[in-house]
Image (cartoon, rainbow, N blue to C red):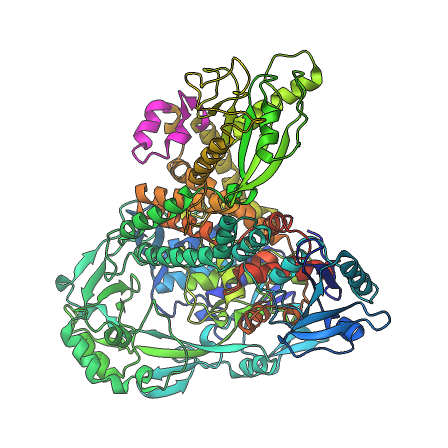
Amino acid sequence: MSRSFDVIIVGGGHAGSEAAAAAARMGAKVALLTIRRDQIGAMSCNPAIGGLGKGHLVREIDAFDGLMARAADAAAIHYRMLNGSKGAAVQGPRVQADRRRYRAAIQAGLTGQENLEIVEGEAFSFRIDGGNVAGVVLGDGRALACDAVVIATGTFLNGKLHFGMDAKAGGRVDEAPSIGMAAQLRALDLPMGRLKTGTPPRLDGRTIDWARVEIQPSDGEEWTFSSQSHGRSCPQVACGITRTNLETHQVIRDNLYRSPLFAGAIEGAGPRYCPSIEDKVVRFGDREGHQIFLEPEGLDDHIVYPNGISTSLPLDVQQQIVASIAGLERAQIVQQGYAVEYDHIDPRALGPSLGLRDFPGVFCAGQINGTTGYEEAAAQGLVAGLNAAAFALGSAPVLFDRAESYIGVMVDDLTLHGVTEPYRMLTARAEYRLRLRADNAQSRLTAKAMAIGVVGVEREAAFVSRETERCEARKLLDAKQGKRSLFESLCFPDFALPELFEHQPLLRNISSDVLDELVNDGRYAPYVERQQREVLRMRSDEVVLIPDDLDYRLIGGLSNEMIERLEAARPTSLGAAGRVRGVTPAALAAILVRCRRMAA
Amino acid sequence: MKLVPTQETIFALSSGQPPAAIAIVRVSGIAAVESLQELAGRVPEPRIATLMTLGRDPVLDRVLVLFFPGPNSVTGEDLVELHLHGGRAVVAAVEAALAALPGLRRAEPGEFTRRAFANGRLDLAEAEGLGDLLTAETEGQRRNAMALAEGTLSRAVRRWRAALIDAAAAIEARIDFADEDDVPEDDGGAGAVIAPLLDEIEAMLRVPPAERLRDGIRVAIGGPPNAGKSTLFNGLVGREAAIATPIPGTTRDLIEFPVQISGMAFIFIDTAGLRETEDFIERIGVDRAQQALDSADIVIWLGEVGTAPGGALHVHPRCDLPGREGLPVGADLAVSATGGTGMEALVSLLVSRGTSLLPREGEIALVQRQREALADCADSLKLAEGAPDILLVAESLRGARAALDRLTGQGGVEPLLDAIFSRFCIGK
């Protein structure tokens, strides 16, 4: 007799953990299936959470009472607000996280979650019943029944590790790849692609000459990732900054023939914004050096992650590279850098709920969808987990909109455009970024999260009281002071907190995060108002639905390229169709005409 | 916007009203070939003008036939052109024969263009230009419509958009990759791109609007009652369009009449005499007269010296009547609409004023929708120039780009289509 769940999550990485917790918060009975329980929540790449665009995603996950922000705060040993000198809308919170503490925090979050059981084992294949998913068969023959599955297997699908010219199958160092499920997904005839990513060699921090590198201390300010965290729980450490130099570059050039990237052994496309050091040297040959951040991996851990020299060159070359860099002359490599190639599903096969269009009940999240980054993975995990639970429980899908969240931007981008390189969140992707700030994530999203019932009592109480305070403060700001209100005055850059307090002393009683959010609302208000017209136009095209069975080949005048893209993405609305790349206004009009004919 | 199933094949007279030397009837849709087979017994080689006989018993006409197979036709569908002899009876007979065929019906206004658009044969800017081309009556209108239809505007927009994307990319890198040491901290040189772009767009916005070119320059004739407005109006339009009597208050409503002078379209407007009145209907007429005078491009004023609205052409009428000879001080011109004195001078004055109100050779005139989008784009660029931080520069550049997208039709598709296609006339 097999055990039965509403939702099974395959994979315990950042996507899987967030998916499992989200589905369980929705009230579904959830199994999190993972090969190694102790690896749940592992950070397999750099020990940092957040950054530009990414930090926004983490705050949005937090607004849904997710795990990532709280775990990041519990493990943070270095805080830094990126773009601190630029506008608030593009400031990106980022922390260095102690690996062990982060993993422990995620695992604690999952074990403390009702309706959630962690099952150790390898997912070998799906059980399918009448075209719908009915369960998962494990490598040891056990079977678990369910109504919905979230695949969050990261780079484990057909993973291949490259250590110099030696390659072996695997997802992470010392862990086996999942070949069975990859074969089954291939057999389902889903569109698949292949991508590549890489890591640098890890160093023993005790062998680094810290006196020879620039030191970057943690931010002095007391901000946290989660609105539910209180201050900083860990001692703060500094990061180091050093650079490659001409000698480093010469070592790399001399050994390019030993790099699988350049010798042609790697077929997958790598990210342009996170290139390997050999890529940087080849593509930007004129530069005299490239920055390296030395990121400590933990408080009781000597390992340091040299961010900026990801490489697939063999170990002896890595040693020469490290030895050529200021401060690292005597640094010992604890674990060599390597490149990973892996399969991903073309995310255009997914609908806006991150469910596979042609395989009802199966949802995908994380690197399997062609993204990179913990934050991107976790945010998709949230979406997939919520929707897998909604599917299993028979409730309405939980959809995210581009004008409302970075999560919505990412899901829309992935499902409409697909990927040509690992997808990373950037603020530039969010056309409505002035309203999608990291500092207003809860104002934007928590009410929605409460409406679907995924917010715990503690956060709900905190949110309600914060909203009350925010409304009161806004009322104070909206009162006319002569010609204009204080809120309206905020669009002048010189009008700031001292001026506010001078005109309205009661504002001193408002907590600083609420007041900062409102100040930023005021700063951007004229621009946001302009954008509002755009949002309305977009929404008016969003309500024109495109029937599932629309045959783009029957619409005259669409180019083959457009037809291909539209068929791959199958946009659900006219607005979405308009965002498919290369679809012209004329083509959109033709699609509209066709939809109306079909409706008539 | 009304729509029809694609199975339906449409036809319409696509040239001017008969009688004329030839009349062109277009048939578009999947039954176009069949209908020709039915009427002429065969289908000619694609794109080769072929002489054929329409109808057997009775023979309808000997006609020149052109066949354009879809999708490479103007509508994107199979299209047949019948060049008939242009008599009313011939045209009516052929239309009746077509209407009797299964699956064929008369086209609705603008339907040919709508199909061309729906089949991806034109973009919106081009579609608007084509609509203007088909209704163009004067040389200036035709030139402007040609420029739009050939995509001059679309090309300019593409060029501007490329420049904006370049500038934006430089800034976005500074925002999204701020912690990379390869990305400098300056503003990315956006200013150098924005200024010349803004100049170009503002120059295009200064070109007088297309509506004046398309619909005509509005010339309103105003003044007190019984000043001779209707007589002058009739003299200018060359016929008895308005009732002119010596009784004050004869003209109550606005009378408009389109006239072409020297290749320029004018609309002359006769108005009710301006006076206080108890007559309810006349009072409405007086209000309308005032509105017409306020919104006219040129006002011809027939009242006393010193009472003329600013910028009006002050005309001294009935200068052949005894006691009214000579030009009063402050008036621009003395005329007699009945005798003809000064009328030629008045017309050439109107033409010279009109010329300054129309786009010059080589300029592209824009319709209201296009002007609004371009003005939006210019506003955004101005905001970008003065923006205090690079995030707001980036946002303004994005707004400018979005405005250009609207110009070629992106965003809010439906109302746009309705507005454009409501302007099209049958068979175009």
Residue A457 visible here:
no
Is B79 in the magenta?
no
Give me the residue at 66% from left, 57% from top: B15
Can residue A227 be seen by looking at this rendering? yes
Q: Where is residue A352 in the image (x, y as percent from the top left)?
A: 58, 61
Residue B133, position as x, y percentages in the image: 56, 54
| Depth order, front residue of A581/A174 | A581
User: Residue at image x 54%, y 78%?
Assistant: A122
Question: Residue A167 at what x, y percent from top left?
Answer: 37, 87
The quarter of the displayed image where residue B387 is located = top left
Give the quadrant of the C terminus of chain B. Answer: bottom right
Magenta range is: A478-505
Could you say where residue A243 lies in the image, as x and y percent from the top left? 18, 67
Work out whether residue B180 or residue A225 is closer to the camera in this orientation and state it.
Answer: B180
Q: How many labels does the image show?
A: 0
Name the residue at 41% across, 16% down: B329
Left or right of A41 in this view: A219: left
Q: Nearer the viewer, residue B199 or A94?
A: B199
Q: Is residue B109 left or right of residue A95?
A: right
- The magenta stretch spans residue A487: yes
Q: In the depicted view, which residue is nearer to us: A47 or A341?
A: A341
